[in-house]
Image: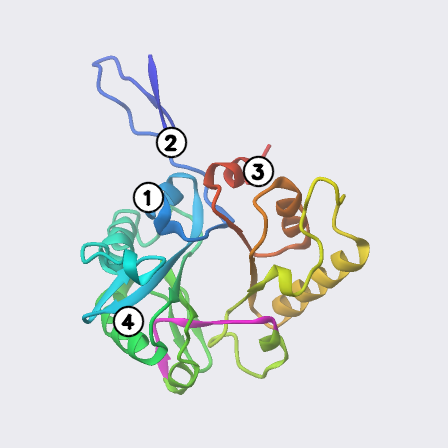
């Protein structure tokens, strides 16, 4: 007999004990937007094979608390407890990777409180996890199990002045015209609705040729510079996911973990 789990089937052995579940297929394009709002932060995304998650962070009484709004921040929901500790445990168990033989895992930290104070506190916390984190210098990126990227309220000047960092800066499309290296800005994220008219509604048809060409230009420019690309404010449906995937967008933003997983899985 067998029983179902969120990440697959668990087969029952002859002695009645469950066999190990089959590991999920890592999905490098899958990004869990506001991941902490799922029933099991991080773990639900990992169970679906997501290789990138996003956590909103507030600095409260010297603690980095994960929550969408300040009123929702709770002392036990720290960045360490929900994300950094379990990621370190996974990386240790899997020989230096979050997924065995999988790609580097991305943790996007969306800072909601003051940029400078929060980054200063975050820098101290990240130092305790240095062995699993990607390191950035002015001229090189040393990829590790987990890559941290800072979004939201970003202390750009402070980060750019550092000789070495355990976190990188989340840029915007305007940064494609800057001279900042990809070791500072490895990721470009922007609001889809500010740059495209298409909303992937059933009555609209597919993305127009003109906007498809525009999207592909953004992708090509980012990739030529050694950066990855992500959009937020994108509808959660197959039409949008198809347009992003086919254009080569690196991270597809979603709140629908199972839906995007089923869309991206090889057929």
Crowding near pointer 1: few (<14 within 10 Å), some, many (20+)? Answer: some
The quarter of the rendered structure image containing the C terminus is top right
Residue 128 lies in the magenta stretch: no
Q: CA distance from mark 4 to mark 1?
A: 22 Å
What's the magenta region?
163-173
Of the image marks 1 and 3, the number of the one nearer the N terminus: 1
Q: Secondary structure at mark 4?
A: helix
Q: Quadrant of residue 195?
A: bottom right
Q: Are marks 1 and 3 in contact (CB under 8 Å)?
A: no
In the picture of the structure, the residue carrying the numbered disc 4 is: 122
In the picture of the structure, the residue carrying the numbered disc 3 is: 263
Residue 166 lies in the magenta stretch: yes
In the picture of the structure, the residue carrying the numbered disc 1 is: 43
Judge whether 144 appears above or below 48 on screen: below
Which residue is found at the position 58% from the left and 52% from the top?
234
Q: Would residue 185 appear left or right of 153 to someone viewing this image? A: right
Q: CA distance from mark 3 to mark 4?
A: 35 Å
In the picture of the structure, the residue carrying the numbered disc 2 is: 6
Of the image marks 1 and 2, the number of the one nearer the N terminus: 2
């Amino acid at each position: 007999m067998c029983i179902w789990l969120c990440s697959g089937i668990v087969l029952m052995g002859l002695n009645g004990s469950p066999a190990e579940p089959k590991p999920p297929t890592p999905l490098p394009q899958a990004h869990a937007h506001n991941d902490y709002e799922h029933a099991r932060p991080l773990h639900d995304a990992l169970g679906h094979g997501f290789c990138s998650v996003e956590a909103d962070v507030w600095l409260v009484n010297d603690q980095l608390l994960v929550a969408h709004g300040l009123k929702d921040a709770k002392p036990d929901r720290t960045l360490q407890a929900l994300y950094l500790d379990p990621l370190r445990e996974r990386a240790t168990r899997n020989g230096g990777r979050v997924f065995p033989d999988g790609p580097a895992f991305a943790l996007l930290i969306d800072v909601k409180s003051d940029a400078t104070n929060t980054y200063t506190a975050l820098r101290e916390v990240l130092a305790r996890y240095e062995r699993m984190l990607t390191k950035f210098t002015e001229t090189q990126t040393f990829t590790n199990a987990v890559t941290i990227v800072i979004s939201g309220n970003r202390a750009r000047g402070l980060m750019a002045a550092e000789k070495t960092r355990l976190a990188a800066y989340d840029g915007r499309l305007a940064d494609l015209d800057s001279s900042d290296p990809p070791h500072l800005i490895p990721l470009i994220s922007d609001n889809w609705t500010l740059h495209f008219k298409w909303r992937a509604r059933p009555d609209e048809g597919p993305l127009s040729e003109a906007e498809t060409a525009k999207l592909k230009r953004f992708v090509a420019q980012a990739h030529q510079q050694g950066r990855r690309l992500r959009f937020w404010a994108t509808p959660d449906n197959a039409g949008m996911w198809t347009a992003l995937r086919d254009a080569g967008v690196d991270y597809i933003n979603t709140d629908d973990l199972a839906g995007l997983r089923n869309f991206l899985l090889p057929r």
